[in-house]
Amino acid sequence: MLYPELFKQLESVRWDMEKDIPWDKFDASALTDEQAQTIKMNAITEWAALPATEMFLRDNRNDSDFSAFISIWFFEEQKHSLVLMEYLRRFRPDMSPTEQELHAVRFDFDPAPALETLMLHFCGEIRLNHWYRRASDWHDEPVIKHIYATLSKDEARHGGAYLRYMKRAIHNFGDDARLSFAKVGVLMASARRTAKALHPTNLHVSKALFPRDTIQSRLPNPEWLEHWLDKQINFDAVWETKVVERILHNMSLLMERSFKSVQELNRFRKELVLTTAT
């Protein structure tokens, strides 16, 4: 089992919301209304760990080890939402999300292949790590800069934990697991070809609720994410390339084969399609 070891690792570096966040360094002059609004949107988006956890537990009923790990992931992701809300409660209570706004992002996701979902969220953690690093750079206010830097490190650790389960899946399921990971890896490393940000919170997950079947579509401002990325934190081609490189690097380690481009990963995916079809 991976859960006991991951619990110890993540417990040893867990931060304390009261002791480790420098609340006393707040500088009101360095926070704009525009910035406070983005903090609210991120707080609500992080709340979506709740329906994601319900999805993980439903689709991994045969995997108690991974399901136990999700207890850690859920706690830490909900803590992300909480610390952003605490920031707003202390310094911009007028911007605090309502309970109704939080509850709006809780809805049932359609069942999906567990291994593809695992890879999807692995890539999501990589992307969010980079988004939060840019958010920390964009803000001038010291406390929220520290918070976003802290959250970005958590997301990187979560990605590392998911990678451990992906390695286990390859050991257990071989090319079927490799194909699932390569398929989603090609998708999630191809953001420059799409008109929207590729992250689990921005993907359609419930046919019955379309078009309001993404987390972002259920926010008070469904258009905020692209604006935040393109116009505010300036998540440009240089930063997108960093995300793609991290995905390809980890796929290379996982598959024990070098991938320098998405095209190379896609060729590998096509090889696996032929292998698994025979």
Image (tube, rainbow, N blue to C red):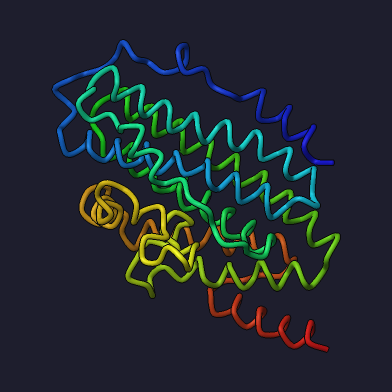
Would you identify the image quadrant in which residue 73 lies?
Answer: top right
Horizontal relation, residue 140 to residue 273: left or right: left
Horizontal relation, residue 57 to residue 110: left or right: right
Q: Residue furthest front?
A: 208
Q: Position of residue 208 (x, y in %)?
A: 46, 66
Q: Is residue 160 above or below residue 122?
A: above
Q: Is residue 28 above or below residue 170?
A: above
Q: Position of residue 216 (x, y in %)?
A: 36, 53
Q: How many numbered circles does the render carry?
A: 0
Q: Position of residue 203 (x, y in %)?
A: 45, 62
The residue lying at 69 percent from left, 61 percent from top is 115
Quadrant location, the N terminus: top right
As rendered, which of 227 and 153 lies closer to the eye?
A: 227
As rendered, which of 195 and 138 lies closer to the eye?
A: 195
Q: Is residue 205 above or below residue 128?
A: below
Would you identify the image quadrant in which residue 32 lies?
Answer: top left
Quadrant location, the C terminus: bottom right
The residue lying at 50 percent from left, 66 percent from top is 188
The residue lying at 21 percent from left, 19 percent from top is 27
Q: Position of residue 125 (x, y in %)?
A: 53, 49
